[in-house]
Amino acid sequence: MLKTSVLTLHLASANIHKLEEFTRLFAPYTLLQPIHLPSSIPPCIEDGLTFLDNAIKKALYYSTVTPGLILADDSGIAVGPLGGQPGIYSARYAGPRATDAENRRLLLERLSQLPDEGAARDAAFICALALARDGQILTTVEASCPGSIVRSPKGTGGFGYDSLFLPSGALRTFAEMPPEEKDRYSHRGRAVANLLSRLALWVENDPRLPLSPALRLDLSQSLPPKSSNESDHPRSGERHPHGGAHI
């Protein structure tokens, strides 16, 4: 009998909420594990200009010190009337040690200073993913979820800006949705779907993946097909209007 193994991705993030979300989104196709590094290895400095810059930098950095497939994410919310803020500074919008509640308060405060008309509260959640191995980027994908900022927090689920974000076409915020409903709308859900499409092709064509022939065949039949809205690599110099690379 052939010995099978699971296709494992190592997530380059210490954010427990992201780990929970990504674990749910990748199941049952892959096993997602957090990276465990010795204290002697400093964390990657996220000083890129876009979400994609930071995702690529993290994936490259951690893939040189950790074997296997390294998945790095950078994501956040961009508010059109604020010129794309908070953007790549979403997690530290109100300061380096700011809490989620402090970041939300600052966002609402700044929106309250703008004229309340037209698209004054339009926003989008953006997610960039980079997959690397042995110091080489294998692929990148990006996705976004358009919506708007509500006037006060609604819901107790989720994290970050979820209680302020109403996705386009939805009747409740991310924080009011059960996880399965949020996944259908979210930027991470869309990015993961794009990445899984590419992994399906790799399972079929890349002999370097650590899979037995039996499991390779099983995954090739169970992974979703390449989606028609899959993001390709951004062209050089092309940027997303909210601070990330072009989607």
Image (tube, rainbow, N blue to C red):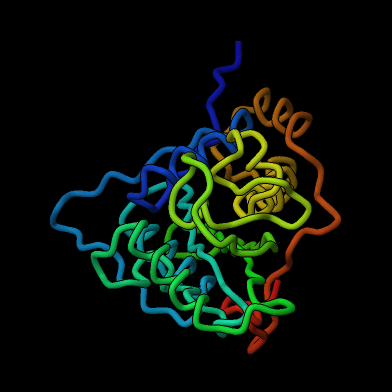
- Up the image or down, 106 lies above or below 127; here it is below
Q: Could you tell me how many numbered marks the image carries?
A: 0
Residue furthest toward the bottom? 237
Quadrant in the picture for residue 236: bottom right
Who's the residue at 51% across and 62% down the image? 75
Q: Residue at x 40, y 58 (%)?
A: 63
Q: Is residue 173 left or right of residue 107?
A: right
Most foreground residue, 154 or 3: 154
Q: Quadrant of residue 147?
A: bottom right
Residue found 58% across the figure and 35% down from its top: 179
Q: Of 54 and 64, which appears nearest the observer?
A: 54
Q: Is residue 155 left or right of residue 230?
A: left
Of the 4 image quadrants, the one containing the C terminus is bottom right
> Could you tell me which quadrant the N terminus lies in?
top right
Task: From this view, report whether residue 44 is shown above or below residue 71.
Answer: below
Residue at 34%, 69% in the rendered image: 92
Indicate the position of residue 72 as horizontal and vertical percent values: 47, 57
Q: Position of residue 99 (x, y in %)?
A: 30, 58
- Report x, y in % for residue 243: 56, 80
Q: Position of residue 54 (x, y in %)?
A: 45, 71
What is the residue that sits farthest to the left in this orientation?
40
Q: Nearer the viewer, residue 145 or 204?
A: 145
